[in-house]
Amino acid sequence: MVMASLRVNATKPLELVKQEIENMEKIKYAYVVTGEYPLFIMAKCLNHQDSMGLIKNDATFLE
């Protein structure tokens, strides 16, 4: 499991970004939280390389 706080620099509303993240295959949970990093996610990845792929490839649609 990968747990991460995400900083959002998108022009979309935060709730819409959260919904798009929740639709990603590996994301199991996404929460809107307070603070500098307004999203917290939990994802299921097979290994370190898989988790890095999640960050580099799957999140590009959020821009």
Image (spheres, helix red, strand yellow):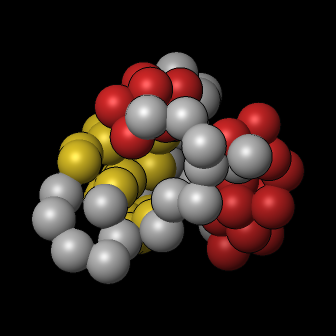
| Of residues 5 and 45, the one drawn nearer to the viewer in this rendering | 5
| Residue 57 image offset from top left, x and y in percent | 83, 50
- Image location (x, y in percent) of residue 7: 48, 68
Report whether 14 appears left or right of 46.
left
Image side of residue 3 versus residue 43, left or right: left
Q: Is residue 29 above or below residue 2?
A: above
Q: How many marks?
A: 0
In the image, 58 versus 20, the foreground residue is 20
Horizontal and vertical percent for residue 47? 65, 66
Given residues 50 and 34, the one toward you in this image is: 34
Q: Residue at image x 70%, y 61%?
A: 55
Question: Quick check: can you spot residue 49?
Answer: yes
Q: Is residue 24 left or right of residue 57?
A: left
Can you say whether 32 is above or below 4 in the image? above
In the image, what residue occupies the spot 23% across and 48% down? 32
Residue lying at 32% horizontally and 42% vertically, measured from the top left: 30
Residue at the far left: name it: 34
Measured as percent of width and height from the top left, residue 29 is found at 30, 39
Q: Residue at x 24, y 45 (%)?
A: 31
Residue 22 shows up from this direction:
no
Residue most extreme to the front: 11
| Frontmost residue, 36 versus 29 | 36
If the image is split into quadrants, where does the N terminus sit?
A: bottom left
